[in-house]
Image: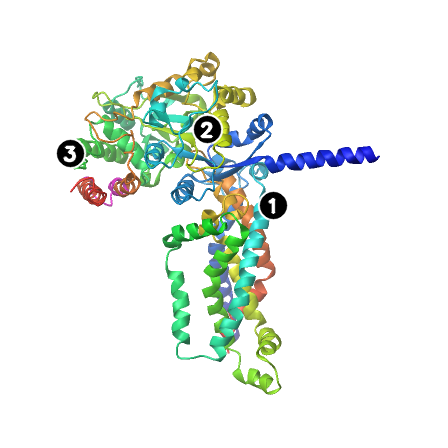
Amino acid sequence: MKRFLGALLGAASLMSVSQALAETLTIATVNNGDMVRMQALTDEFTKKNPDITVKWVTLEENVLRQRVTTDIATKGGQFDVLTIGTYEVPIWAKQNWLLPLANLGADYDANDILPQIRAAVSADNKLYAAPFYGESSMTMYRKDLFQKAGLTMPEKPTWDFIVDAAKKITDKSKDVYGICLRGKAGWGENMAFLTAMSNSFGARWFDEKWQPQFNTPEWKDTLTTYVNLMKEAGPPGASSNGFNENLALFNAGKCGMWIDATVAASFVTNPKDSKVADQVGFAMAPNKGLGKNANWLWAWNLAIPAGSKKAAAAEKFIGWATSKDYLQLVASKDGWANVPPGTRTSLYNNPEYQKAAPFAKLTLESINSADPNQPTVKPVPYKGVQYAAIPEFQGIGTQVGQQFSAALSGATSIDAALQAAQAATEREMKRGGYIK
Amino acid sequence: MARRTTTTHAVVSTGAAWLVGLIIFFPILWMILASFKTELEAFATPPSFLFFEWTTENYGIVQERSDYMHHAMNSLTIAGGSVLIAMLFAIPAAYAMAFAPTERTRGTLLWMLSTKMMPPVGVLVPIYLVFRDLGLLDTRTGLIIVLCLGNLPIVIWMLFTYFKEIPKDILEAARMDGATILKELAFVLTPMAVPGIASTLLLNFILAWNEAFWTLNLSTSNAAPLTVFIASYSSPEGLFWAKLSAASTLAIAPILILGWFSQKQLVRGLTFGAVK
């Protein structure tokens, strides 16, 4: 009995010692399907690394952005791993707020990361964040409505075709609208779409000397096409629609086309959530024949804040969560269709994935066709496809987005919205010291 | 004739009160209904009111993904702690201002209230730095302090209004009988102002329970209350209304029950001194 009690006490003290030695990682993340799945699989990581425990802080995107920015700027040290977008990575890396990732594991194979995504999360040839999932945007359309209207969607549609098709499909008496596009104001909402669209029209945010370009004919052409198209073939109240609102409209069978994030492909083809799951076709985002498509590039990435006291454990976690083995793990648990997309070349070469995800080829093509280093037809001084990676962009993007949303709702004219956008951007760029 | 008019008047005013009540309660009702829908039904246009396929799946998911009890206990500790500490400071302060006013009392009261006029985000960075240096980030103590300070002006104002309604003569009589200030506060003033104190306590408990700016910004996991629990169910990509509604229903349930049981006290306190 004594021996048994001794053994029990010994085991208990060993457990408490190991718990005391265990490092706890606090990970901040967004509430997206792939992130939720990662949280559910955390045990697989801690089983392999018993000296590390993981705590999750899940927040809405904008709250998370504010929360982690406050913490990293004040060196609060509340988080060991951050989930950040491709917009933040180059800015924060330049501020020395992030640690470069050099020890992600021997079999990590960083060369397997899709080149465009890798470029978006690197600075000075160093990886400052590891992509967890990546996305571009593409055209999703209703095959049944196209057939009924006698239309065939080309693999690489032009804007002229999209405008024409949207008008033909629209049947307002049946609550069916030719096209659903983002209209809700915000740099990550309507401006993500409109900036990508403007790239295909040959427009740009700034010229090489950081002069705002909203007074150019390319921007006028972009906004006029968008507003007129939405007025004629868009759903009512489109100026309040963001990703989720359009997703609900498309899933309810009310949109003929929807140009938005590639990640939506798995939502609109899921029969549990979508009434039109078996009728969805995919094509590239539209172009204007100028060599750029209207598609963006985005990735959610895991990064380590500078000054982290648990950098080694944090890097171990990032190495696990963004590895090829993690993709295999998700596939074995939830099937290949649920693997986080858009980060690794090997995933797109995998025949099992190609079979499970019919949109895989187009997602890859869309990601590859968006170049964050040369996003526009004319040269620009900034990085980023649907944003300009400068700290001022969030504020400017939202101000411009409000003007364009007002033009869509009819509260202001296209010309007045462009003038106001030009004036607001000039003011902020002068304030930021970019121009005099 | 007069009786009929009174009946009609009563019917109309009761009907109007019910209508206003329903309008105010409707968002909460809608949230509760949405929590029993599937994500697609929660987002459907036109929305279905009662005739949908009822499901408890969202509650299951929320229970599986989050530790509700951990967040609820944090909310209880933070809201309860901050209100009790605020009362300890506010009762003597309101007593002094109500029964021994000086020419600066009014200015002091207005100054206290003016601190509520500044948007909290304006002082986020300095407070974050102070909390970082004092090791108060993500602690219940830190949140109790910040919410207590945030609500203190309202608590003092409310108590001051109630105390002013109590006749000075009663306190003077107690003093003549030899009561010290502490005894006066504890045995004369407090029992007389119980409805006022109770409603101040309840109202500020609700305010602290619902506070979302500081609790979201100063906590991560250890001290995270129910506001953080709700925020974790909002998503920019993907349908989330039903799950968010389930999380919100669970978060407001304790406060709804508390409000239901204490409504008499709350109404009595809020109308204290209003009708003489």
The quadrant in which the C terminus of chain A is found is top left
- Three-letter code for the amino acid on which mark 2 is drawn: Ser
Does the magenta run of residues contain A407?
A: yes
The numbered mark at residue B69 is 1
- Using the image, determine if residue A41 lies above or below residue B8: above
Query: Mark 1 or mark 2: which is in front?
Result: 1
Choose top left, top right, bottom left or bottom right for residue A235. Answer: top left
- Three-letter code for the amino acid on which mark 1 is drawn: Met
The numbered mark at residue A216 is 3
Disc 1 element? helix
For the record, the magenta segment spans: A402-414
Q: Position of residue A364 (x, y in %)?
A: 37, 19
Residue at label 2? Answer: A274
In space, the residues marked 3 and 1 are separated at their CA atoms by 57 Å
In space, the residues marked 3 and 2 are separated at their CA atoms by 41 Å
In space, the residues marked 1 and 2 are separated at their CA atoms by 34 Å
